[in-house]
């Protein structure tokens, strides 16, 4: 029993250590603390004559400005571009301390002394918390005692993330115009959100999202979008495990001043072992879901670059098949794609069974939306993409070769290569890592 208690205690300490000091619950706590400080300050003003209040305010302003100047000229532990709101919080803390001291000097007493001391301490805590939220000096509770989340990607609730920012840093390529702001965490975050099929009617499970540090910054960068699709059977979160999504994109962000694509992994299956084929068919309107519902939700709920030229789609296995299907059918929405170990056509088994299940046996209806057939009939010079397969993947590697040759014949700007391994996450995770620089250039993150 004591072992279980120790394990639960360790888990609790781990969760507390990873608690964010930049957003989420801390934001609500600082807001409540600010209200309490405001109410306490009003009471404090009743205990002091007007002249004493003016003296405390003056000293707080002078102390805030003078302290900031000394910090910048001497040690500079805080960035020089600290926003004006931070000085307000610093001044509030100084005012609380000076006001408390004046009250104690003029009207001593145990109860009054305790109350004003608590108020001064709370003002100082709120001020420090607000400044830290701006600077990101201590990203988590554990970092206060030296436990830094090095290389970690925190999982957070979507509704705890910062909302719309009034100022976005724009300009392409992003790297050329990006000015790293004060308030930017060291790592990105992973979250979940429901993306309804308002137009398609597709019943999707919650999507997995990765938001890079530059998206969490204030001001944030206007970033491109990478839509990824997982395999079948599976779920969107498989990209975190099999595809090493968070660690790979976070590592890219760390090499590029915090910016990377905003990654959204919607559910394109509907259930763990479903296989709707990534088309609009009797099995579900997945194509409309990915072409309309998902982009509409992204643009309504995230601040990203709305230009489709800065959007890409990718996936592994079923998701790879889905990526090339969406790119060919909707080149204006997804002009760039990553096809890792995909098939040469959507399949629920054999070809006849697939056409029967999806289009009631109508071959023409299938051919009208099948990427391989469309590439044989049309040219797509506006599309660019990458095909990757495992060297030991004797089932999907030949299909990737077929699709690569079809894409090249259709005038696409494409590449193909193999990696050691079979039909597994070792191939897909490595492929994503290798293609991050290509994505960065293609999506105008880097020159």
Image (spheres, grey):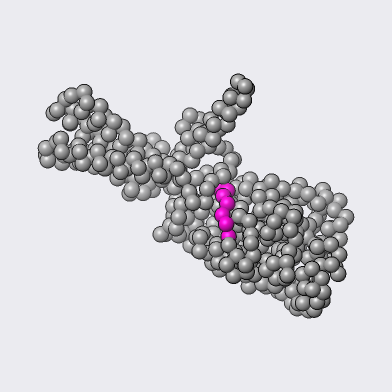
* Residue 407 in sight: no
* Residue 378 in sight: yes
Front-lying residue, 406 or 415: 406
In the picture shown, does residue 196 fall above or below 107?
A: below
In the picture shown, does residue 267 fall above or below 109?
A: below
Q: Is residue 257 left or right of residue 242?
A: left
Q: Which residues are magenta?
A: 188-195
Q: Quadrant of residue 111?
A: top left
Q: Is residue 429 left or right of residue 137?
A: right
In the picture shown, does residue 384 fall above or below 186?
A: below
Q: Quadrant of residue 321?
A: bottom right
Q: Which quadrant is the C terminus positioned in?
A: bottom right
> Tag count in the figure?
0
Residue 343: image x %, image y %?
80, 62
The residue drawn where x is 20% and y is 37% is 44
Q: Which quadrant is the N terminus positioned in?
A: top right
The residue drawn where x is 66% and y is 62% is 313
The residue drawn where x is 46% and y is 52% is 162
Residue 375: in magenta span: no
Front-lying residue, 224 or 243: 243
Residue 266: image x %, image y %?
63, 58
The residue drawn where x is 44% and y is 47% is 183
Report the magenta stretch's main SS.
strand
Residue 53: image x %, image y %?
16, 39
Furthest residue to the right? 394
């Amino acid at each position: 029993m004591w072992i279980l208690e120790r394990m639960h205690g360790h888990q609790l300490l781990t969760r507390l250590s990873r608690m964010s000091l930049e957003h989420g619950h801390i934001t609500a706590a600082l807001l409540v603390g600010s209200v309490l400080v405001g109410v306490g300050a009003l009471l404090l003003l009743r205990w002091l004559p007007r002249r004493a209040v003016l003296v405390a305010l003056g000293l707080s302003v002078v102390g805030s400005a003078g302290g900031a100047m000394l910090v910048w000229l001497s040690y500079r532990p805080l960035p020089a571009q600290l926003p004006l709101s931070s000085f307000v919080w610093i001044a509030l803390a100084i005012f609380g301390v000076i006001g408390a001291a004046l009250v104690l000097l003029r009207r001593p007493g145990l109860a009054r002394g305790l109350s004003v001391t608590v108020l001064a301490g709370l003002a100082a805590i709120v001020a420090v918390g607000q400044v830290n939220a701006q600077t990101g000096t201590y990203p988590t509770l554990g970092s206060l005692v030296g436990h830094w989340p090095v290389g970690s990607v925190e999982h957070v609730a979507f509704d705890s993330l910062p909302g719309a920012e009034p100022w976005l840093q724009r300009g392409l390529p992003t790297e050329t115009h990006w000015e790293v702001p004060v308030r930017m965490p060291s790592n990105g975050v992973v979250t979940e959100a429901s993306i309804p099929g308002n137009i398609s009617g597709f019943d999707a499970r919650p999507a997995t999202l990765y938001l890079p540090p530059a998206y969490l910054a204030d001001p944030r960068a206007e970033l491109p979008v990478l839509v990824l699709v997982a395999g079948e059977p599976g779920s969107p979160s498989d990209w975190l495990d099999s595809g090493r999504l968070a660690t790979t994109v976070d590592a890219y962000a760390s090499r590029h001043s915090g910016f990377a694509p905003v990654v959204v992994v919607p559910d394109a299956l509907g259930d763990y072992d479903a296989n709707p084929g990534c088309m609009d068919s009797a099995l579900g309107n997945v194509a409309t879901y990915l072409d309309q519902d998902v982009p509409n939700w992204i643009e309504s709920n995230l601040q990203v670059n709305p230009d489709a030229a800065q959007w890409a789609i990718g996936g592994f296995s079923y998701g790879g098949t889905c990526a090339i299907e969406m790119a060919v059918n909707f080149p204006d929405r997804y002009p760039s794609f990553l096809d890792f170990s995909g098939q040469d056509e959507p399949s629920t088994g054999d070809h006849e069974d697939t056409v029967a299940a999806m289009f009631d046996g109508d071959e023409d209806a299938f051919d009208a939306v099948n990427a391989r057939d469309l590439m044989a009939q049309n040219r797509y010079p506006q599309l660019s993409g990458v095909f990757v397969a495992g060297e030991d993947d004797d089932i999907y590697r030949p299909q990737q070769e077929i699709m690569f040759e079809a894409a090249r014949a259709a005038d696409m700007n494409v590449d193909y290569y193999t990696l050691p391994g079979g039909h597994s996450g070792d191939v897909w995770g490595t492929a994503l890592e290798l293609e991050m620089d290509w994505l960065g250039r293609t999506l105008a993150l880097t020159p």
